Amino acid sequence: MKKFVTLLLCFFVGWNTAFAHGGHKVSFSKPDAAAANAIIWISVAIVLVTLFLSIKYLVRPKENDPNHIKNVVRDEGF
C-alpha cells in the first residue's frame, strides 16, 4: 500500500510540474457552439433513455420465474 501511495504521489507531482512550466504550451482548440450543443443534447438523450429503461425494468421486470431474485427479495422482506 505504501508503494502504491508513493507511486500515485510521484505521478501527480510529476504531472503538475510537467504542465506548470511555461515552456511547453499546449493550445486546445475550442469547439464551436453547434458542436458543443450537439454533444450536450446527445448526452442528455442518452441519460434520459437510460433513466427511462432503468425505471421501466425496475418497476416491471417481466420475470415470472418463482426462483428469480426479485421474488426472493420481495418475499423475504429485505
Image (tube, helix red, strand yellow):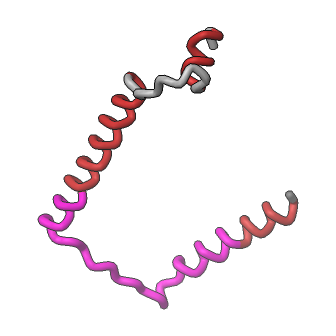
Give the left or right position of residue 43, taking residue 24 as reference: left
Q: Position of residue 41 (x, y in %)?
A: 20, 53
Q: Nearer the viewer, residue 25 or 1?
A: 1
User: Which residue sits at x=24%, y=48%?
Assistant: 45
> Residue placed farthest to the front in the image?
65
64 in magenta: no
User: Which residue sits at x=61%, y=23%?
Assistant: 67
Position of residue 19 relative to residue 57, above or below, is below
> Residue placed farthest to the bottom in the image?
23
Question: Residue 8 sits in which quadrant?
Answer: bottom right
> Residue placed farthest to the right in the image?
2
Q: Position of residue 6 (x, y in %)?
A: 80, 66
Position of residue 31 relative to residue 56, above or below, is below
Question: In the picture, which quadrant includes the C terminus?
Answer: top right
The magenta segment is: 11-39
User: Which residue sits at x=60%, y=77%?
Assistant: 17
Numbered-mark total: 0
Position of residue 26 relative to residue 39, above or below, is below
Q: Nearer the viewer, residue 52 or 41?
A: 52
Question: In the picture, which quadrant includes the N terminus?
Answer: bottom right
User: Which residue sits at x=66%, y=76%?
Assistant: 14
Q: Position of residue 74 (x, y in %)?
A: 56, 13
Q: Nearer the viewer, residue 56 or 31?
A: 56
Question: Residue 32 sits in which quadrant?
Answer: bottom left
Give the left or right position of residue 56, taking residue 17 as reference: left
Position of residue 12 relative to residue 25, above or below, is above
Q: Nearer the viewer, residue 59 or 25?
A: 59
24 in magenta: yes
Q: Position of residue 10 (x, y in %)?
A: 73, 71
